[in-house]
Amino acid sequence: MKSIEIIKDLINHVKEARSVPLSRDGALVNRQEVIELLEKLQEQLPDDVQVANEILDAKEAVIDEGRRAAEALLEKAKDQARRLISEHSVLAQAQREAQALLQMAEAEVEKMRLETNKYIDARLANFEVSLHKTLDAVKRGREKMVGKGQVED
């Protein structure tokens, strides 16, 4: 995400700034450069949020794909069950196999759903961490620029 790169640039800019004489935490930064970096960040964040929304949309696509695959598997199981039932001598065997196929299909659907949810949760957790880091970095940058306690949220 580009916003993370901008934040890193902003942090480096503050780290490399000359210290204010007789001040432990004070630094002289070029206000225009910091403002430009913050404006770039402000422009980039909506794009990064769009990426997160696309990940959420992809979740739905993955779930739909899994659903279609499960339905196809269920239909295949039903077709096989119908075929086996038509053979009178193997009726009992056909019922057992059909039930097993249905259970396997249901288990596979559940497994796919759990894996999809884990994947999406991990992606969203990473994005959440990135956003928190971004917000913390911006807050620290603002506090260092203006002075602690003078920034209003």
Image (cartoon, rainbow, N blue to C red):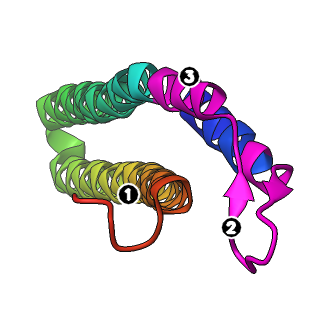
The residue lying toward the viewer, choosing from 135 and 110, is 135
Q: Which residue is mark 1?
A: 121
Residue shown at 75% from the left, 80% from the top: 24
The residue lying toward the viewer, choosing from 98 and 50, is 50
Magenta-drawn segment: 13-41
Q: Quadrant of the C terminus?
A: bottom left
Which mark is first along the chain, 1 or 2? 2
Which mark is first along the chain, 1 or 3? 3
* Helix, strand or loop at mark 2: loop
Q: Residue 26: which disc?
A: 2
Marks 3/2: CA–CA distance = 20 Å
Q: Residues within 10 Å of mark 2 (few under 14, many from 20)?
A: some
Query: Which quarter of the picture shows residue 10?
Result: top right
The answer to whether 100 appears left or right of 55 in the picture is left
Which mark is first along the chain, 2 or 3? 2
The percent coordinates of residue 89 (x first, y second) are 21, 44
The answer to whether 19 appears left or right of 75 in the picture is right
Q: Residue 36: which disc?
A: 3
Q: Amino acid at mark 3?
A: Glu
Q: Residues within 10 Å of mark 1 (few under 14, many from 20)?
A: some
Q: Residue 96: which disc?
A: none
The percent coordinates of residue 96 (x first, y second) are 23, 59
Marks 3/1: CA–CA distance = 34 Å
Look at the picture and state if 29 lies above or below 83.
below
* Helix, strand or loop at mark 1: helix
Q: Amino acid at mark 2?
A: Gly
The residue lying toward the viewer, choosing from 140 and 29, is 29
